[in-house]
Image (cartoon, rainbow, N blue to C red):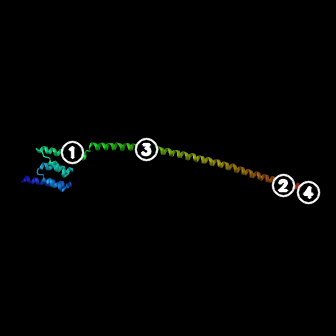
Amino acid sequence: MEQEEEKNIIIEFQRKVLQEANCTAEMLAYLDEIDDDVFREYYCICALDGMTVEEIRRIDSIAVQDWRVKIKHIKEERLNFLENIFVPNSEMQKQISELHDKAGKVFQETEELRITLNATLQQTLDIQKNALTEQRESYQNSLAAKEELIKERDEKIQSLVNEIEQNKKIWQTEKKTLLLQLEEKKII
């Protein structure tokens, strides 16, 4: 009786663990049908790993003569299941590797394009800067030349104004002299 009670405690403990792991009611019901304690323990481990009730039923339905062969088979099935989950197959690994290589190449090409673009933009900025500097110098030279022309013109205008003033004085003096001469001729 004590052995039966111990078995029930173990089964109840397994049920609680499986319930905490969110195993389905169908899984719990199926495991309750397993009489052999060792097989039940292995199937509980398989359920905790994430195997479905259908997968466990399939494993359990395989007929074998020796219980050691059946345990070996359960272990192999569990290992295959875990490998499928955690170890990607070679084709998928190859695809991942190819994608990784492509991503690396794209990154490298993008980096090269960025460097080239930055260099081109810097050259363009340097060209624009030089052009603006030359244009500013040209405007400054043009402005200086125009200021010089304006200064020369102002000097020329001032010179002409002075000449006109001088000619006006001379003309005034000559006019007076001429008028005096005319008046003297009238008087005589």
Task: Give the residue displayed 72% in from the left and 49% down from the top.
Answer: 156
Q: Is mark 2 on a helix, strand or loop?
A: helix
Q: Where is residue 160 in the image (x, y as percent from the top left)?
A: 74, 51
- Going from the N terminus, do you reach mark 2 or mark 3 first? 3
Q: What element carries label 1?
A: helix
Q: Residue at x 77, y 52 (%)?
A: 164
Give the amino acid at mark 1.
Answer: Asn
Give the residue pinned by disc 3.
113
Q: In which quarter of the image is the N terminus?
A: bottom left
The residue wearing badge 2 is 175
Task: Tell me the mark number nearer the camera, choosing from 4 and 1.
Answer: 1
Quote the CA–CA distance across marks 2 and 3.
Answer: 89 Å
Of mark 4 and mark 1, the one earlier in the sequence is 1
Sequence order check, earlier mark of 3 and 1 = 1
Q: Which of 7 and 104 is in front in this view?
A: 104
Please, what is the three-letter code of the amino acid marked with disc 2?
A: Lys
Q: Mark 3 or mark 4: name the one nearer the start of the chain.
A: 3
- Mark 1 sits on what residue? 80
10 Å crowding of disc 1: few (<14), some (14-19), many (20+): few
Question: In screen coordinates, is 94 left or right of 19?
Answer: right
Q: Distance between the Cα atoms at labels 4 and 1? A: 149 Å
Q: In which quarter of the image is the C terminus?
A: bottom right
